[in-house]
Amino acid sequence: MTTLVREPAEFRRACDDARADSSRVGLVPTMGALHEGHFSLIDEAKNRADFVAVTIFVNPLQFGPSEDLDRYPRTLESDLAGCRERGVDLVFVPARESMYSAQFQTHVSIEELSKPLEGECRPEHFDGVTTVVAKLFNLAGPCAAMFGRKDYQQWKILSRMARDLDMPIEVVGCPIVREPDGLALSSRNRYLSATERKRALGIASGLRRAHDAWHEGERNPATLRSFAQEPVQSEFDGVDYVAAVDPDTLMAAAPSPSRLLIAVAAHLGTTRLIDNVVLGEDPRP
């Protein structure tokens, strides 16, 4: 049976009660509009824990003034149905005022990892992410928390936050889930028209080209970046970045690295998509 709670105190009490009953808590923080990518996180949480809690909260702090907060899809009834089907124990759906009082003035910042890539395009975004996730970690207590590696930089930042602040949280990065044609699953995919959906494959095409070149022995980051960049530039209306960086620091990679993160953010109309592959580690997209 899946229990729905809306107040932070109820959420904390339910997680505390689960641990008191000798259950390990698995946490899946989301903004809702759940798809198979989210459900794969739930499945992994069930593999690692005895009691699985999903949070659904469209966090206003991580949206910039010109971004899609009001437009972001909200599908609570189908989300709850999906959680019930997957055997989730608890779903936490707080109101905005329950998470941020009128006097709220505390924010969590991660310095270096937040600066490149998304940080250059969305300078306040990660402060919003780390602040809300720190609150969720504090409410849930000791647990294993699942995050998708499609948001690779977010996963690295939250892992660093948990380590630096001695949070009793195992932050787990889970593989990207893709459509059969390679498009990474995203709640924002539903914004795409049929034509845009086809053009969106430019990212997967670029990542595959870089992956294939790596497999054939190419190790120059600039060359691998160029393989990824060409299909993205030809299909998308705007490109925020196509980067080839160190997967741990997110900064410039060594001249001949053993692993290399290729990360992409690009726009089709008003829809912004991100994706990535870690060469030397991930399967072909």
Image (spheres, grey):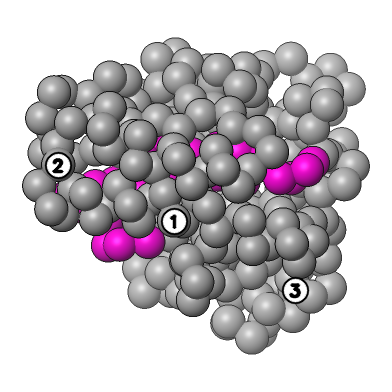
For disc 1, the neighbor class at 10 Å (few under 14, some 14 to 19, many from 20) is many
Q: Which residue is mark 3?
A: 80
Q: Secondary structure at mark 1?
A: helix
Compare marks 3 and 2 and give the one earlier in the sequence: 3
Q: Position of residue 273 (x, y in %)?
A: 62, 46
Image height of 74 relative to 171, above or below? below
Q: Which residue is mark 1?
A: 205
Q: Secondary structure at mark 2?
A: loop
**Residues under labels 3 and 1: Cα distance?**
34 Å
Magenta stretch, overall SS? strand
Q: Amino acid at mark 3?
A: Leu
Q: Secondary structure at mark 3?
A: helix
Q: Position of residue 11 (x, y in %)?
A: 67, 55
Image height of 105 relative to 65, above or below? above
Q: Amino acid at mark 1?
A: Ser
Tell me if residue 274 is in the magenta stretch: yes
Residue at 34% of width from left, 42% of height from top?
A: 227
Q: Is residue 118 left or right of residue 13?
A: left
Q: Nearer the viewer, residue 25 or 180?
A: 180
Q: Quadrant of the N terminus?
A: bottom right
Q: Is disc 1 in contact with disc 2, using a CB cutoff of under 8 Å?
A: no
Q: Nearer the viewer, residue 123 or 94?
A: 123
**Residues under labels 3 and 2: Cα distance?**
46 Å
Q: Is disc 3 in contact with disc 2, using a CB cutoff of under 8 Å?
A: no
Question: Where, by quadrant of the figure, is residue 50 drawn?
Answer: bottom left
Q: Which residues are magenta?
A: 262-285
Residue 170 visible, this angle: no
Tell me if residue 207 is in the magenta stretch: no
Q: Position of residue 147 (x, y in %)?
A: 47, 52
Q: Which residue is mark 2?
A: 218
